[in-house]
């Protein structure tokens, strides 16, 4: 039942992405604001590269649980995946993590060059906001909810959210591990963009104050646990399963939980956070069955 529902949500995401960003044909559009064909190709290369679609599925699942409009949620979910994809393209660049592979195939800059990869990321980020705002204008009956959803996504992805976390992550390379700094990095670099879809869904569906608090607690615990597990996979994971190189955090001098407290205590911290995430869903009762199963799936991942 869970896998069927997950597949249903992923299909909705893929449908939204194809609808929002079809391949254009004109190399140099004569008029209007059409996307030039090559730019569109570079954007689609990474956007349609597959993956588990974790963040948009979270948005759809939370909106479904709360009884929100799934058509409105589909566009928001697609835009959120564009923002996540832009961040991956830029993360992989030589000036950041300098990765050659992502999801088992060459990274964007290895196929199209650094300049075009930067523009593909820029394009996805800006187009995501176009889609979010158009979604609000297309549904005036819920404009406030959709604008608030767009606002929370922008905030959690931006200079006080994911970008802030990534900035401090870069500044902290080859420095002495520090618990407060590491907590800030993980909260913003990773947890913010896993909490954003839940809160966005709450705005789309008109959640109560108690529901918002529960969604945020779930997202933050899930997000930090997810990042700790990702750090552990870089130490212990199989590169073939992961679709990317392992051992890179140590090579780059990254500040991680294993570098701060060691592998065993990192596992303990992760387990504590997964428990907190589960407890946060209590307010929703049985309606949260999918989110519970979703968290269990992330917790047991090997790639």
Image (spheres, helix red, strand yellow):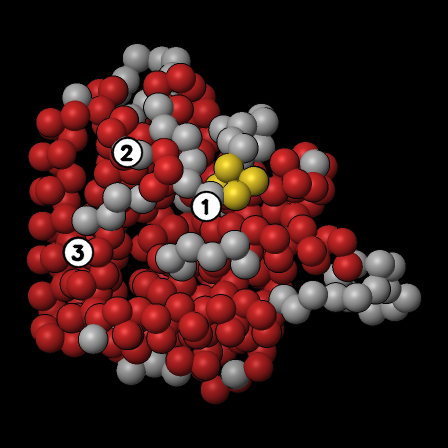
Query: Is mark 3 in CB contact (under 8 Å) with mark 1?
Result: no
Mark 2–mark 1 Cα distance, whole angstroms, equals 14 Å
| Relative image position of residue 264 (x, y in whole percent) | 11, 27
Taking 149 as reference, is 267 left or right? left
| Relative image position of residue 269 (x, y in whole percent) | 13, 35
**Image disc number at residue 237:** 2
| Relative image position of residue 200 (x, y in whole percent) | 38, 65
Q: Residue at x 40, y 80 (%)?
A: 70
Taking 275 as reference, is 302 left or right? right
- Closer to the N terminus: mark 3 or mark 2? 2
Q: Residue at x 66, y 41 (%)?
A: 111
Query: Is mark 2 in CB contact (under 8 Å) with mark 1?
Result: no
- Closer to the N terminus: mark 2 or mark 1? 1
Q: Residue at x 87, y 59 (%)?
A: 28
Query: Is mark 3 in CB contact (under 8 Å) with mark 2?
Result: no
Q: Residues within 10 Å of mark 3 (few under 14, many from 20)?
A: few
Mark 3–mark 2 Cα distance, whole angstroms, equals 18 Å
Which residue position is annotated with label 1?
103
Residue lying farthest to the front in this orientation: 240
* In the image, residue 155 above or below residue 88: below
Helix, strand or loop under label 3: helix
Which-is-in-front pick, marks 3 and 2? Answer: 2
Taking 119 as reference, is 137 left or right? left
Q: Residues within 10 Å of mark 1 (few under 14, many from 20)?
A: some
For the N terminus, the image quarter is bottom left
Which-is-in-front pick, marks 3 and 1? Answer: 1
- Closer to the N terminus: mark 3 or mark 1? 1
For the C terminus, the image quarter is top left
Which residue position is annotated with label 3?
296
Taking 7 as reference, is 21 left or right? right
Mark 3–mark 1 Cα distance, whole angstroms, equals 22 Å
Answer yes or no: is residue 208 visible: no
């Amino acid at each position: 039942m869970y896998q069927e529902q997950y597949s249903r949500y992923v299909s909705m995401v893929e449908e939204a992405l194809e609808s929002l960003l079809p391949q254009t044909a004109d190399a140099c559009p004569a008029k209007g604001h059409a996307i030039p064909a090559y730019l569109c190709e570079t954007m689609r290369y990474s956007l349609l590269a597959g993956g588990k679609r974790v963040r948009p599925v979270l948005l759809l699942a939370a909106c479904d649980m709360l009884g929100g409009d799934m058509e409105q949620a589909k566009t928001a979910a697609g835009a959120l995946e564009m923002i996540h994809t832009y961040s991956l393209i830029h993360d992989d660049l030589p000036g950041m993590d300098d990765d050659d592979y992502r999801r088992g195939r060459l990274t964007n800059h290895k196929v199209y060059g650094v300049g075009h990869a930067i523009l593909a990321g820029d394009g996805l980020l800006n187009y995501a906001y176009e889609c979010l705002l158009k979604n609000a204008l297309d549904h005036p009956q819920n404009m406030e909810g959709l604008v608030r959803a767009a606002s929370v996504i922008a905030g959690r992805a931006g200079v006080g959210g994911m970008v802030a976390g990534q900035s401090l992550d870069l500044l902290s390379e080859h420095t002495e591990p520090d618990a407060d700094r590491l907590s800030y990095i993980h909260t913003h670099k990773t947890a913010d963009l896993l909490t954003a879809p839940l809160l966005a869904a709450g705005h789309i569906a008109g959640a109560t104050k108690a529901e918002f608090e529960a969604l945020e607690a779930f997202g933050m615990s899930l997000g930090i646990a997810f990042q700790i597990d990702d750090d552990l996979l870089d130490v212990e994971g199989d590169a073939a399963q992961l679709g990317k190189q392992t051992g890179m955090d140590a090579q780059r001098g990254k500040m991680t939980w294993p570098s701060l407290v060691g592998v065993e205590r990192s596992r303990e911290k992760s387990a504590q956070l997964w428990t907190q995430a589960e407890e946060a869903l209590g307010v929703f009762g049985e309606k949260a069955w999918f989110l519970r199963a979703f968290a269990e799936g992330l917790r047991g991942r090997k790639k």
